[in-house]
Structures are given as C-alpha cells and as structure tokens.
Image (cartoon, helix red, strand yellow):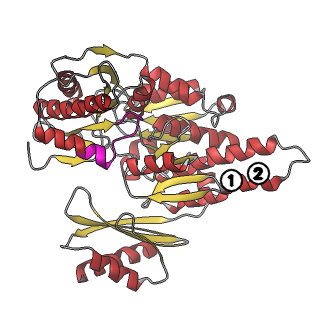
Amino acid sequence: MTDTLMVSVSGVRGIVGKDLTDDVVSRWAHAFGAWIVAARDGERRGGGATVVIGRDARTSGPAFARAAIAGLAAAGCDVIDVGLVPTPTVQLAVEHHRAGGGIVITASHNPIEWNALKFIGPDGIFLDGAAGARVQTLMVEGGAGRGRAGKVTMDEGAIERHLDAVLQLSAVDVDRTRRRRFKVALDAVRGAGGPVMRTLLERLACTVTGINLETDGQFPRAPEPVPENLGELSALVRRSGADLGIAVDPDVDRLAIVDENGAPIGEDYTLAFAVRAVLGGTMERRNAGTTAGTPTRSIISSFHRSIVVCNLSTSLVVEDAAREVGAQVVRTPVGEVHVARAIVRLGAVIGGEGNGGVMYPALHAGRDAPVAAALALELLARTERTVSELVAAAPRYTIVKAKTPRGPALEPVYMALRQRFTDAQVDTQDGLRLAWRDRWLHVRPSNTEPIVRLIAEAPTGAAAQQLVDEGRRLCVAS
C-alpha cells in the first residue's frame, strides 16, 4: 500500500494503479464486510450479512466492483449489485434492502485519475468516526474468510425507485412544475448522472438540452461543478434559451445552477433554494389551509422551531433563506457525515453543504442531486420568478479561500485570532470560526494535507480578502 492512499472515516481514495489496485480494493472491501458480519453476529441475527454495491462511471469502476465483490463474498457477505448509479441511489438501496451496509465506488468530484471506496452504514449514512476506525483496524489486521462465500444478485430497479421517491415528495408539486414546461440545459460531465437527470427532468415535463450525458467516465473538463468549470453549460443556456442550467458531479450527489442569462450563481444557492422550496412551500400550504378563525401566531411559531443544518463553511445565503421562513440554522464540522448525523439527531427539516449537496430527510439524510433539482424547479414554479430574480432578491456575498503551511500547533493561532476579533461569535467545533451578522472567517486544519485552510465570506470581495489576509498573517506570526 502506498503512503499517499487517503483514508478517512467514511472510506479510502487514491490514484488508480498507484494507490488503488484490485488487491487494495478487495482487502478494504473484505475489512468492511468483516465489520458488517461482526455487527450482525453481535445483534444475533441469523443468516448472512448483506452489502449493496454501486459505482459511478469512472473507467476503473467495473474492475474495482469485481474486486470489491470478491472481498465482500470472501468475508461471508451476500452482495446486491445495483450497477452504475448515483451515490444517493446506493444509499437508498441500503435502506430498501435493509442491508448491513453499502459500498460506493466513486471519487466524487476528484480528477479522472482518482477513484475511491465510500462506506455506508445500515442507516444509509456514511460511516462515522468509530465505525470507520474499526474498519481501518480490520484492514490492518487482515484475516481469513468466513468459509461461507456470499452470493451475488443484481438489483436493476434501484434508479427507478429513487426517481419515483423524489416525485412523491410532498414538497414537490409535480403538476405545478409540469405546467411551467421549463427548458433546462444539463451537464452531467459524462459521469453517472446523464440518463438519471434527463429522465427526472423529462418526467417533470422539462425540455432538456444536454451536454456530456454519456456515462463513459471520460470527463471533458474538471469534474467539480464550480463556476469556473461551467463555461460550456453557460454557453448552452444562452444558445438554447433555457430557463436554467443544471450541472451535477460524477456521482450525482452535488448540483450547481446556472441562471437564465448563463451566469453560474454558485453552489451555495442550491441549498438556499432547497430551503426556500421546502419551508416556503410548507408555509404556503399551511396558510392556504388556515381558516379565518385560526390564529396565525401558532403557525408562525412552528417555523421558528424548524431547523436547517449546514456545515461551518456554508455561505450566509443559506442563513438568509432560513431566516426568511423563520427557521433556525445549526452548523456542524465540515463533512457530510457530520451534517447527516445532526439532521437525524435534531429532527431537522432539511440540511446540506455549500458545495451543492442538498440533504432532505423526508427521503434520506444524504446529498442528492435529483432531490436538489426537483426542489429548485419547485421553487421556480411556485414563486414564478427566474433564477436571477431569486438571487437578486437576497443579499449577495463573496467567498475567498486560501491555505497556508501548518505549524506544530494551531492553538496559538486560534488564541491570536480571538484576541484580534473580540467582537466575533466564536465556534470551535472544527478549528475556529469567527462570525458576525454579515461575514465570517473559518480557520481549520486540512484533513488531507499538512496545511491550514482559511475561508472567509463578506458582502464584498475586498472585505472577505481582508479577513483571510489577517488570518494568514496570524498563522505565520504564531
């Protein structure tokens, strides 16, 4: 195993052929299978443990799927193979089959030479720290098979169940969206999302003009759906006269939006739109059902108890959206699993990350681009506004990101920052976040590199840059 293989609580990733080989994949899958079997044995359940496996469109995916299946079978697990599907489809399949867990073979938005194994627990959520550490220990220890080789079956209905579930969400008024006959430009970066997203949009009566919808894994551009990578989609929106453009990442758990003028609006707006779609639509439905004699105070107060969960580096546009509908924002450390666990623990209405990942627990607590697309169209249909009008109606911010070498200790840096900004609200869940009403600075150690990440947001780029510069100066001075 190489020194550059990147291991986190929820999985393992690396460069194909260097860090990840068939043997490495098989051994990690065997360790995960052993963890599943041990959990089932501990619960004293009869029969074999079951693991769902799926993959994105990367060219190394089929070989790695075979290697992972072999490792799981050797550990005594039965395997349900859902094939080439979005990551959230695998998460939903774990829940549907009441499986012991799942593996997604995907490096998400990483460059084309990467791949990864992501491990899902029996609740359809990626593994947390304790479970991930146990799998890693089992990988190091190794171990023989269970004697009983697990069986392998195919599940060809996973995508269909996923799309059906999205269209049955109470927050999505399918008929209203269909009446709008939206024109949508779609870029799936030749990952797993082309056929899935096209089918969903067409079921919502959208006219779809697409690029990069093939599922061959030959990414034509950097795969992350950030504004600098969406030039071709922006041109397609303008050329086709689309109402909006939609871009997804290779494993279809993140979604970014381009407005009707061809301007990428930034991934944080995906979650902000979803918050408005869910909670604003709920308010509309409740108000429509209110009789003249019903006190409005009880209706309004119920929204003040609604919770939206996002991580510490998510934009203030999400807080503004939550404030509009009377919801409370709870922030967590960076990482999807942290947001998902908080959503479940707090009974949150919706949550997600500022990278375009919407997590709507009415379906499941995982990032889901089909859900995000349906909610964005719902908001446009209900408000009868364009994307640019929705963006213009709320405050705008600029985010600036930087990094600096990490010293032997960060506590002196945090202390210096707190002494410099004594008027800020302080959050120490994940590094240090200093916040004011209209701006913030987040300084945290990278989980994957020996660096400190600095990210700031403010009403202007100059103000955000000033916060980052001050943070960097104190990092160097300490």
Q: Is residue 273 above or below residue 52?
A: below
SS state under label 2: helix
For the N terminus, which image quadrant?
A: top left
* Residue that numbered label 1 is attached to: 303
Report the side of 431 relative to 365 (left or right): left
Report the side of 122 relative to 67 (left or right): right
Specify the farthest residue to the right. 293
Total marks shown come to 2
Report the side of 123 relative to 316 (left or right): left
Residue 345 image offset from top left, x and y in percent: 50, 48
Residue neighbourhood size for the residue with mark 2, other residues' Cα within 10 Å, grouped as few (<14), some (14–19), many (≥20): some
For the C terminus, which image quadrant?
A: bottom left
The part of the image, by quadrant, that contains residue 101 is top left
Residue range of the region highlighted in magenta in the rendering: 121-133
SS state under label 1: helix
Q: CA distance from mark 2 to mark 1?
A: 7 Å
Residue nearest the observer in this picture, 315 or 396:
315
Residue 203 image offset from top left, x and y in percent: 57, 24
Residue 299, labelled with which disc?
2
Q: Is residue 453 above or below residue 148?
A: below
* Magenta highlight on residue 54: no
* Magenta highlight on residue 123: yes
- Residue occupying image coordinates x 23% and y 55%: 448
Residue 151 image offset from top left, x and y in percent: 25, 14
Residue 206 seen from this side: no
Residue 177 seen from this side: yes
The part of the image, by quadrant, that contains residue 207 is top right
Confirm or deny contact between disc 2 and disc 1 (CB under 8 A): yes
